[in-house]
Structure formats: C-alpha cells, structure tokens
Image: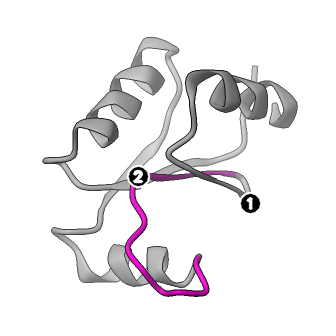
Amino acid sequence: MVYPKIKLYGAQRCHKTQYYQVFFNEKGLTFSFLDVEKYANYAEELRQLYENRKLNFPTILIGSKKLRNPSDKELNKWLNKLK
C-alpha cells in the first residue's frame, strides 16, 4: 500500500501529538513529525495552513488533505481514501 506523504504538525509535549505518532507507528506508516515549538520554520508552515495563522496542533496533512485533531475513524477514512 502506498500512501501520500504524511506530515504531523505538533509538539513533543502534546499528548494528542504523541497519540498520533503511536497511531502511525503501529500501522507501520512513514510520517514526518514537525515540532512547531522547537522549530520556527515548521510553526510558520503550520500557520500558513490556517487563515487565522494560529498554531492549531496537532494538524495532520495526508498529501494535500488537512486534518485538525481527527478521530481515529476520520483518520482511517482519509488514509483509505487517499491511498
């Protein structure tokens, strides 16, 4: 199965970000973790995804699909739809 590129914008201290890291790892999916508190360039990338320019994390990009703090059901739906 080939998925589009997966990006996880979040912060290492955030329990929801940690949850998604485990979620992707358990599924054996390759993803990029972009720590928006540690790296200003990742924070700026995330701000550009939202009109209000806020650091809305965790945010997951699967290809060009943006998901803000999705449920497992929603995340699985988009993973299946975009593979």
Q: Amino acid at mark 1?
A: Ser
Most common SS among magenta residues: loop
Task: Name the side, left or right, on which 19 lies relative to 61.
Answer: left
Q: In the rendered structure, which disc, 2 or 1, sits on the residue that comes first in sequence?
A: 2
Q: Which residue is mark 2?
A: 58
Q: Which residue is mark 1?
A: 64
Give coordinates of residue 78: x percent, y percent. Answer: 76, 34
- 33 and 65: which is toward the camera: 65
Residue 33 x, y percent position in the rendering:
36, 49
The Cα atoms of the two marked residues, 2 and 1, are separated by 16 Å
Residue 14 horizontal side relative to residue 25, left or right: left
Of 23 and 29, nearer the camera is: 23
Left or right: where 78 falls relative to 11: right
Q: Quadrant of residue 15?
A: top left
Quarter where residue 72 is shown: top right
Q: Where residue 34 sits in the image (x, y, percent)?
A: 35, 59
The residue at the point 28 percent across, 68 percent down is 36
Query: Which SS class for mark 2?
Result: loop
